[in-house]
Image (spheres, grey):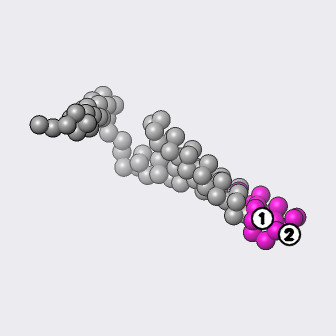
């Protein structure tokens, strides 16, 4: 006899696939170029905050003379913010 957790996971996957199939029947599947455009958009959502963090970090490091401390710190913060924005954009679609 299967455990309740396994049944919930299995039934949840089936339900998710059914909802996806219904969505595709209602709205149609996305085209190849729509997927490429989304990939490009997500890429820029990650790249731009990362580059802004690097730019501000370099500026601060030059002013304060701290080596690469602020550059690396703000680069990582920009990368994290960009990844969060991309994740949110994908899950809203």
Drawn side of residue 58 relative to residue 44, left or right: right
Point out residue 49 in the picture as x, y percentages from the top left corner.
65, 52
Question: Is most of the magenta stretch helix, strand or loop?
Answer: helix
Location of residue 13 by image quarter = top left
Q: Is residue 46 visible?
A: yes
Disc tally is 2
Q: Which quadrant of the structure image shows residue 65?
A: bottom right
Question: Could you tell me which secondary element the residue under label 2 belongs to?
Answer: loop
Q: Residue at x 29, y 31 (%)?
A: 19
Report if the CB atoms under discs 1 and 2 are less than 8 Å apart.
no
- The percent position of residue 68, horizontal first and vertical second, equals 75, 69
Q: Which residue is mark 2?
A: 65
Question: Is 57 within the magenta?
Answer: yes
- Tell me the magenta residue range: 53-70
Residue at position x 78%, y 64% in the image: 58
Q: Horizontal and vertical percent for residue 67?
A: 79, 71
Question: Residue 53 or 64: which is nearer the viewer?
Answer: 64
**Residue identified by numbered label 1:** 58
Residue 48 colored in magenta in the image: no
* Residue at 32% in and 39% down: 29
């Amino acid at each position: 006899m299967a455990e309740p957790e396994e049944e919930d996971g299995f039934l949840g996957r089936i339900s998710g696939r059914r909802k996806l199939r219904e969505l595709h029947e209602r709205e149609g599947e996305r085209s190849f170029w729509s997927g490429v455009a989304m990939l490009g958009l997500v890429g820029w959502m990650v790249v731009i905050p990362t580059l802004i963090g690097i730019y501000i970090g370099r500026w601060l490091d030059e002013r304060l003379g701290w080596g690469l401390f602020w550059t690396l710190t703000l680069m990582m913060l920009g990368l994290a913010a960009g990844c969060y924005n991309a994740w949110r954009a994908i899950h809203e679609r």
